């Protein structure tokens, strides 16, 4: 019997570096990320948002996130600030 095909995830990421209005010397990443198989798409307002979006899509596949990711996601959920709920632009 052949081994099952591993689940695959593809993402399209569009990022641009923007200067903030508060301080000209401070820049941040903004853009969009899309999970290709589902078509789910979100705005990102920093590289941490990008990681959260990807983690939310690969975790149900059985990928075990490291301790720091689990702690971060737990803290975000407590604040009601999970990326899937934040960026429905």
Image (spheres, grey):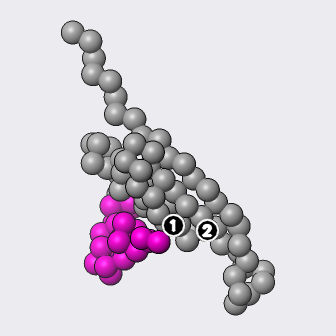
What kind of secondary structure does the magenta stretch mostly adopt?
helix
Q: Does the magenta stretch include residue 37?
A: no
For disc 1, the marked residue is: 43
Q: Quadrant of residue 2?
A: top left
In the image, is 88 to the left or to the right of 16?
left
Magenta span of residues: 68-89
The answer to the question of whether label 1 and label 2 lie on touching residues, with beta carbons closer than 8 A, is yes
Query: Mark 2 packing: few (<14 Cα in 10 Å), some, or many (20+)?
Result: some
Q: Nearer the viewer, residue 74 or 23?
A: 23
Q: Which of 59 and 75 is in front in this view?
A: 59
**Residue 47 higher or lower than 10, as above or below:** below
At 78% across and 84% down in the image, what residue appears?
Answer: 24
Determine which of the numbered discs, if any, sits on residue 66 in the image.
none
Mark 2 lies on a secondary structure that is strand
Residue 64 placed where, x, y %?
31, 47
In the image, is 29 to the left or to the right of 50?
right
Query: Mark 1 packing: few (<14 Cα in 10 Å), some, or many (20+)?
Result: many
Disc 1 to disc 2, C-alpha distance: 8 Å
The N terminus appears in which quarter of the rendering? top left
For disc 2, the marked residue is: 30
In the image, is 38 to the left or to the right of 20?
left
Residue 37 in view (yes/no):
yes
**Residue 50 higher or lower than 6, as above or below:** below
Residue 52 placed where, x, y %?
43, 61
Residue 64 in view (yes/no):
no
Q: In which quarter of the image is residue 83?
A: bottom left
At 31% across and 79% down in the image, what residue appears?
Answer: 80
Q: Is residue 73 magenta?
A: yes
């Amino acid at each position: 019997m052949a081994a099952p095909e591993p689940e695959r995830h593809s993402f399209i990421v569009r990022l641009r570096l923007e200067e903030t209005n508060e301080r000209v010397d401070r820049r941040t990443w903004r853009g969009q990320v899309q999970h290709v198989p589902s078509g789910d798409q979100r705005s990102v307002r920093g590289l941490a948002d990008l990681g959260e979006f990807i983690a939310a899509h690969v975790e149900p596949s059985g990928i075990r996130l490291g301790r720091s990711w689990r702690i971060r996601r737990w803290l975000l959920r407590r604040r009601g600030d999970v990326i899937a709920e934040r960026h429905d632009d």
